[in-house]
Image: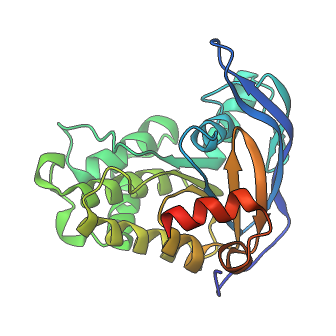
Amino acid sequence: MNPNSKIGDDIIVIDKIRKIFPNGVIALDNFSITVKQGEVVVLIGPSGSGKSTFLRCLNGLEKIDRGKIIIDNIPLDYSMKNVMSIRKEVGMVFQSFNLFPHLNAIENVNLAQCLVQDKTKKEASACSKELLIKVGLADKINAFPNQLSGGQQQRVAIARALAMNPKVMLFDEATSALDPEMIGEVLDVMKNLAADGMTMICVSHEMSFAKEASDRVIFMESGCIVETGDSSDVFTNPTESRTRDFLNQIL
């Protein structure tokens, strides 16, 4: 469990959401959770259980078929105004880094600040430099993506998301595309964000991160919550047999 957690009021309210894909697959079914400000929640479960789909629903990349999503008192009603407001509140880091290859690290972090926040290049660069230092890339500010390792590229992507000053960060298996020796450097950045009080929802197969940095672990299967609780309880004494079977296979 995250020892530095400073839990505040509810910032995310998910009420009985349902997501069905055009092929009839039910990705999320009657899914409800509440996340508090400063809380770190890690979603675990087998592939295809709906974890990534849930994150994509949170920032409007996927549209739900039923239920309610409210983030920082803004309902996700799919009006352009509210979708854009929520995307300003929520930063997301994907499995792939999605950096522009023709821009160096600081330019990649600058871009959205200039386009969305109307910052000058000087203002954006000051913020970007601070964030790149924060994620441990002080010596890579002017490096291009092809000059960076996978872990370094993912840290640029994290800095880019943080540059929008989000209230919530979503991590969709942020380390799954990395070589094993690079995973730790990205997880360290995520742990530091958790220690700083950032509200985070993470899909992760890194059980050590879930144990150490999370306030709550949610085990999902078939679009439903099977078990949820304090990380120490879920990992050491799961109440559901399906959770036990899953953990026995991966631990």
Percent of width and height locating residue 18: 80, 30
Query: Does residue 126 sit above or below 230 in this rendering?
Result: above
Q: Residue at x 60, y 56 (%)?
A: 44
Visible residue check, residue 36:
no
Q: Residue at x 11, y 53 (%)?
A: 147
Query: Does residue 82 sit above or below 165 in this rendering?
Result: above
Query: Does residue 188 sit above or below 123 in this rendering?
Result: below
Query: Does residue 2 sit above or below 171 in this rendering?
Result: below
Residue 246: name its quadrant: bottom right
Percent of width and height locating residue 227: 77, 59
Residue 22: name its quadrant: top right
Q: How is the image coloured?
A: rainbow
- Please give left or right for residue 178 compared with residue 228 in the image: left
Q: Nearer the viewer, residue 216 or 249?
A: 249
- Please give left or right for residue 50 compared with residue 145 in the image: right
Q: Nearer the viewer, residue 198 or 215?
A: 215
